[in-house]
Amino acid sequence: MAVSWPFDSVLTQDGEGNPLYSRAYSSDVIARVLARYFRNGVFANPSTGLQVLQNEGMTILVKEGAANINGRHFLEEQDRVLTVQAADASLDRIDTVVLRLNLEMTMLNVDLYIVKGVAAATPSAPDLTRNASVWELGLANLFIAKGVATVTQERITDTRLQSERCGVVASVVGDTDTEAFYTQVQADLAAFRTQAQADFLQWSDTERAAFDAWFDHVRNTLGEDTAGALLTLIEQHAPQQKTATLAADGWSVAAPYTQTVAVDGLLATDTPLVDVALASSAETAVLQLEAYGLLGRVTAADGQLTAICYAEAPTVALTLLLKVVR
């Protein structure tokens, strides 16, 4: 059946005086038209639209904002507070903050909900419901550690930019404000680097013993040509530059998500300092920075590197730049 609109509707009346319209349009027709103009997701202006933030205790705050789901529009004009169910006593879980379109006749609305995940030794985010009646967008994942009484910001993973779970609807008029997204990525990156540096400084007894043995070797090696011997030793132990590529589909299936890749010349005793190589495309670089912020830690073994993500696995490939300190 062909559908065309809009056209003026001619009003007539039946024999009992009831109004009859020659062209009456259902909400489904309008939604189908709008769905061709706007893809599903949150509207990016402002960049904080429907952003999930920590609040008091076991509650979270969802910032005001707008979204589109299958041609249906949602507008929240003030910040909303949602309550998270109590943490499990012995197991972790991951909950998802969703924006849900419900076309069931008893509902017919779009609203915010928290979908409770399943507590497990290695929890994963719950699947989004997407069928003819209910369609959900995932705004954020909440890592609910066992026994906690507060949801902190570092346990909230913003998924608005992930197209498979949510996505962004670019504004038809005006520029797209990405400041909040960029700020979060920078904060995640800074937190990761701080932790990496702290891990580097906290050597184990084995690492300290290895350093002491190396230092004794240096003292015994130095002869008459002290400067030459020192230069040789410095060159032998200077930081080495290496790279490791993490594939988008190479992560384990459950949290904590891990991926192990080969790195020629890497040793189990190495302490790699990690940065990320970014694409020249600004859009791709933002996605890579967000994915880089998901990395919890990396560990070295002979000839290989293992990356670990605790709450969520990256969905884009990452090239890690390693500075190996021995």
Image (cartoon, rainbow, N blue to C red):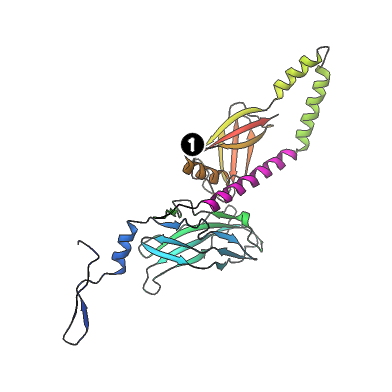
Instruction: Please state if 61 lies on the left or on the right of 112 as rendered.
Output: right
Spot the residue most to the front: 174
> Which element is circle 1 on?
loop
Main SS type for the magenta part? Answer: helix
Hey, what amino acid is under mark 1?
A: Ser
Residue 201 coordinates in the image, percent (x, y): 74, 39
Above or below residue 239? Residue 143 is below
Q: Which residues are magenta?
A: 175-201
The answer, for residue 199, to whether it is visible in the render is yes
Quarter of the rendering occupied by the N terminus = bottom left
The quarter of the rendered structure image containing the C terminus is top right
Lateral position of residue 18 relative to residue 39, left or right: left
Residue 262 visible from this viewpoint = no
Residue ID for mark 1: 280
Q: Position of residue 135 (x, y in %)?
A: 41, 61
Picture coordinates of residue 235 (x, y %)?
A: 70, 21
The residue drawn where x is 60% and y is 54% is 121
**Which image quadrant for residue 88?**
bottom right
Q: Residue at x 59, y 33 (%)?
A: 321
